[in-house]
Image: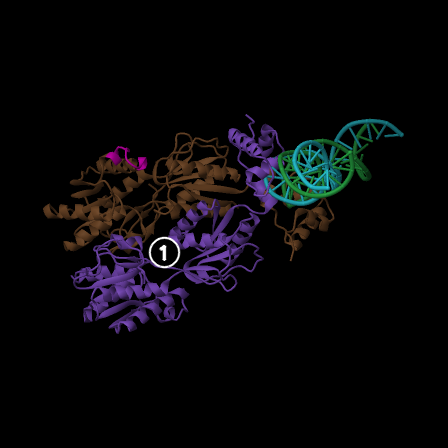
Chain colours: A purple, B brown, C green, D cyan
Amino acid sequence: MGKKRVTLADVARLAGLSTTAASMILTGRPDTRLSPEAHKKVHDAAASLGYRPNVAARALRTDKSRSIAFISDYVATTRFASGLIRGALSAAEEAKHVMLVLETGGEPAREIQAVETALDRQVDGLIFAAMRAREVFVPDLAINVPVVMLNGTSARFPNSVLPGEYEGGRKAVELLVGSGIEEDIVLLGHNAKQEEGLFRSETIARRFMGIRDAMADAGLQFSAELSCWNWEPNFGYELTRKLLKSRRPRALLCLNDRLAFGAYQALGEAGLKIPEDVALVSFDNDELASYLRPGLTTIGLPHEDMGRRAVELLLGPQENAQPDLVPMPVVVRGSLPAALSAQSVKPPAT
Amino acid sequence: MGKKRVTLADVARLAGLSTTAASMILTGRPDTRLSPEAHKKVHDAAASLGYRPNVAARALRTDKSRSIAFISDYVATTRFASGLIRGALSAAEEAKHVMLVLETGGEPAREIQAVETALDRQVDGLIFAAMRAREVFVPDLAINVPVVMLNGTSARFPNSVLPGEYEGGRKAVELLVGSGIEEDIVLLGHNAKQEEGLFRSETIARRFMGIRDAMADAGLQFSAELSCWNWEPNFGYELTRKLLKSRRPRALLCLNDRLAFGAYQALGEAGLKIPEDVALVSFDNDELASYLRPGLTTIGLPHEDMGRRAVELLLGPQENAQPDLVPMPVVVRGSLPAALSAQSVKPPAT
DNA sequence: GTGCTTTGCTAAATCCATTTAGCACATGCT
DNA sequence: AGCATGTGCTAAATGGATTTAGCAAAGCAC
């Protein structure tokens, strides 16, 4: 019936020592002067009783809970969030922390709620994750624990983890050039506001910069730039269809995989072969990209690495205050003319 | 500098009452005999100081933490997990609980770890979530809090939340029949072991039963059943391609959206029009299904509802001990000949 | 043997909210 | 007046760990 949990006092009693001694030994204090025999007795007692410390009691005393909060705007609209969460979760587990997940829907009231809830529970750190990389609103509350922005930035909290979009943009162009394509490349998904960093995402602006710089370095120009305000498959489809009425490009550089997916559909209908007639490169490494035939070559968003990195930063020494740029992996599949073989490739040296 | 947190004692002092009184008033005890003035004074004091109770202290005393643990095998391999998590998260928020998310990778050692970690933290309940509905291994530990199995079952813990696969299976067939298709229907993704419930998922067996029963009720038989051991796009593609060499079916009943996706590709290559030449119905309501053209009509897995339901069961009165079957929504898109218009439809009366 | 340091350990305070037991006074009844 | 009952509130114990302050015995120097 009433078998209560084993407490430190029980362990101490069995070991024939004080709770002080037991506590010091089990928490592994360094400067203690307790004898080796005492250590052994306490450890044995703890093991034989199956002692597990009461986390609430410990948190009450120490104000540390070995837990962190992952506060995100959306966890649903995700092929994104789950990667971030998974990476964070795994790093947290390694650091023997648990992770509270909170969702705010981007609503200020819920954001305040979430932060208060987290702080009430003595979390040792906060991660603010945004599903679209952007300047994130962080409620104006006194926060007395470390904060890391994940896939977003905040003026108040300089520590952030972002995808290395500039390099990613460059890589996409380099892939095209590297497979011998040097003319009639069309950019699919151009958006002036995004390029200026005004809409949705600052980091996308860097992706554009990388693309532009690499094009310039290769001495190339896009033969057309197709604009849309949203990067969904039907835009990719419509834009590509319209394009094909007047010309037939050698390659499409798509700003994400869903646009590329739409483009595949339009190319298929037009009877064009990928990559023989038209080659494609894209961004994100959506699950989608591996389902297409041929597989879509894409510069992946390193969500899992980012989540992991955020936790490491959070629990680490809290020094550097510049954004941590996580390299975007190059995932080579069949949508480019051969040269490289298939399979995923980690970011190369350069 | 050292502005500490406001404690209950501070509130009591400001209100000119004892901490006992403050505690009783703030926790909203029903049978208290404290005066209305006392109530007002305490509430005012708490508000003016911005008092927030220390959750650790409360948990220590009451053994309740207003938190639950969501223990899942995989959170990554997900278009699935995120729906479950999101639903659970939102129900937890409504119930003013927080949710710890733990991932085990299906490894027994980590499962034990996860349960211990959760219990150490005084969680008020455990949700064991499986990414594929199945009998789930639950570590053999003393668990003294409610447990709900989510998308899985366990002999030890009868409370579970599962998709209503039998009805879902029926609905898929009824959709085909309802749009006037009565012959030459091919089943894509048959798998004897799954149908017997021996492989991966028990609940899939019920999906098959629903399909078979509804076919029988309509007096129909499949003109072919294409088997494969894995429901990925390339299987759908290859099987459909092979099929098309010898015959041209009127409809494909696909066991999930990814198979259907593969079928779309093969049908497209063969120049067949959907739904005029070949109609499709499928299961899951993957994000994918909405990207296809025409959109894929599919019987959705109600992950979000399931997650939500699991939390409600967990925090509810703990009575019923039979599986809670959450209805699978019918999502009508363009892959069936008209009759019903577009858009998502909630499960109809029958 | 006196005085000082070191070694090995412990008593008691502390973190903060909840809860049990019960006090002091007022009211009602006879 | 005497006793029971009700009202409004509080002192103190409690939960389980960590941590501060410090005690007793042993070792050492001279």
Location of residue A251 with respect to B265 vertically, above or below: below
Tell me if A12 is positioned left or right of B91 in this view.
right
- Quadrant of the snapshot with the N terminus of chain A: top right
- Quadrant of the snapshot with the C terminus of chain A: bottom left
Q: Is residue A320 magenta?
A: no
Chain letter of the residue beneath label 1 in the structure image: A
Q: Regarding mark 1 in the picture, which secondary structure is present there?
A: loop
Based on the displayed image, in which of its 4 quarters is residue D28 positioned? top right
Tell me if B307 is positioned left or right of D16 in this view.
left
Boundaries of the magenta span: B193-203
Q: Residue at x 65, y 55 (%)?
A: B3
Query: Which residue lies most toward the top here?
Result: A1
Based on the displayed image, in which of its 4 quarters is residue A60 positioned? top right
Q: Residue at x 59, y 45 (%)?
A: A62
Location of residue A90 with respect to A340 vertically, above or below: above
Q: Nearer the viewer, residue B118 or B48?
A: B118
Indicate the amino acid at tag 1. Pro
- The reply to whether residue B276 is in sight is no
Query: Which residue lies most toward the left here?
Result: B246
Q: Position of residue B329 (x, y in %)?
A: 34, 46
Tell me if B322 is positioned left or right of B94 in this view.
left
Q: Position of residue A78 (x, y in %)?
A: 37, 53
Tell me if A12 is positioned left or right of A75 in this view.
right
Q: Position of residue A175 (x, y in %)?
A: 26, 63
Q: How many marks?
A: 1
Q: Nearer the viewer, residue A51 or B296?
A: A51
Label 1: few (<14), some or many (≥20) within 10 Å? many
Q: What residue does disc 1 label?
A: A302
Q: Is residue B201 magenta?
A: yes
- The reply to whether residue A123 is in sight is yes
Q: Position of residue A81 (x, y in %)?
A: 40, 53
